[in-house]
Image: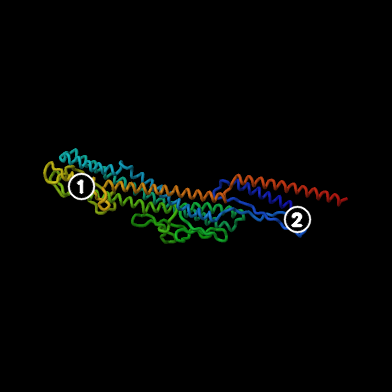
Amino acid sequence: MAARGLDAQRMGLELTGQNISNVNTPGYARRVVDFASVPGQDSRSAGGGVTVMGIRAIRDSFLERRVQQEVPTEGRAAALAELLQVVQTGIGASGASLDARLSEVFGSFSRLADAPASAVARADVLNATDELAQSFHDISSRLVDSQRSAEGRVRSTVEEINALGEQLAALNRSLSSAGPDGKLSVQDQQAVIIRNLSTLVDVDVLTNPGGGLDVTIGNGRALVIAGESYAVEAVAGPPNGLSAIESGGRVITDEISGGRLAGAIEARDVNIPDYMSRLDTIAFEVVRQVNALHRTGFDQQGNTNQDFFTPLGAVAGAARLFAVDPGVAADGGQIAAAGVNAVGDNAVAKSLASLRDALVLDGNSATLIEGWSSLAYRVGRDTRSAVDGQKAQADIVKQIDALRDSVSGVSLDEEAVQMIKFQRAFEANARYFSAVDDTLNILFQIVGR
């Protein structure tokens, strides 16, 4: 009985040391030892002492599940915020970006109206429109680069998901040969992998009878089943080469709703294309409106029905293709400022300048500059919404983590109390052992006489 007591308290001390050693180990769940009394042999026996029933890790399945549910939302918002912040930087500050270039173009037409025969005024128009074209090109290029960055994020995230799936499958296979303590360590590693997977993509997790974890993504698509992992793929497709997510040969892109993968897909397929479409609409409308007026005017050689900008066949790609007509760009005299074929007339130049305040966008409810302001506002709003969503979700995850740590985490203060308790119990058992030993020695001496 005394020997069992010493062994049991020693086990408690060892377990306390194990908990303290792993206080900063990710995924580690606090261990506790279960004791049970050994019954006596008959009614006149005090009992057989204590025995160790086993060691177990303290986990709350409900809180673990809540973490798996909330972490993907945080990951999605984080990825979306990161990508949109880059877009917001790329479009420039209000008053110093495309809106400033548009204002300068209309201002140059106004100055041309004041001096329609001036070569300097005509060169000023060409310089302003060339800067506008460059601004359209630069912003369009940055949006394309942002979309490619999002595509790269999609592909790298898929690779991370597959790597984690393989690790989890290997852990599942190792359970069959792991001892009791080894299984607890495997469970700790499983918890870390599931947390990392949940950050990348929303997953459903099922614990099988052997302790292994089966993981699915999307609408029940297998990622890990027992000791086998099933890779997801990012498969490039037409028309722009962007990747679709496939599992088992089936496209599951629309089934991904959480995690950093969902955030990257949303930025790539929804937000950035919307910004590109709005930018193209502004560029297309600038070309259409200016050309429509310019064709009604006369240049310095008396020619009419000429385009100022290179005509565009469609809205898509307008910002990238935006350019001044080569003939006009080579000769400022071809700018049609006159409304009639007469020297000094400025009717068309005045009409071009008045486009600054013309309601030509959004169903004739907004000016070109207001259209750009609306685009810049939308980018800022989406970015702020993603950043705020990330912060709010991070607070939720932090609170759930705190609740889980209160159950599963290691408290140094609590372990110190446990250590003293087991130490005192060990000392008491040692004294009891000595007392029994002394009693037996006296008994042997009496019998020996």
Q: Which mark is residue 92?
A: none
- The one nearer the camera, 316 or 32, is 32
- Find residue 428 and report its horizontal and vertical position in percent: 72, 47
Q: Nearer the viewer, mark 2 or mark 1?
A: 2
Q: Distance between the residues labelled 2 and 1?
A: 107 Å
340 with respect to 322 (left or right): left
- Residue type, label 1: Phe
Residue found at the far left of this picture: 342
- The one nearer the camera, 59 or 311, is 59
Local packing at callout 1 (Cα closer than 10 Å; few below 14, some 14-19, many 20+) is: many
Q: Which residue is drawn at 83% across and 49% down?
A: 442
208 with respect to 147 (left or right): right
- Find residue 178 and report its horizontal and vertical position in percent: 60, 56
The reply to whether the C-beta atoms of the residues labelled 2 and 1 are less than 8 Å apart is no
404 with respect to 130 (left or right): right
> Which element carries disc 2, helix, strand or loop?
loop
Name the residue tied to disc 1. Answer: 308
- Residue type, label 2: Ala
Q: Residue 46 carries which label?
A: 2
- The one nearer the camera, 89 or 155, is 89
Local packing at callout 2 (Cα closer than 10 Å; few below 14, some 14-19, many 20+) is: few
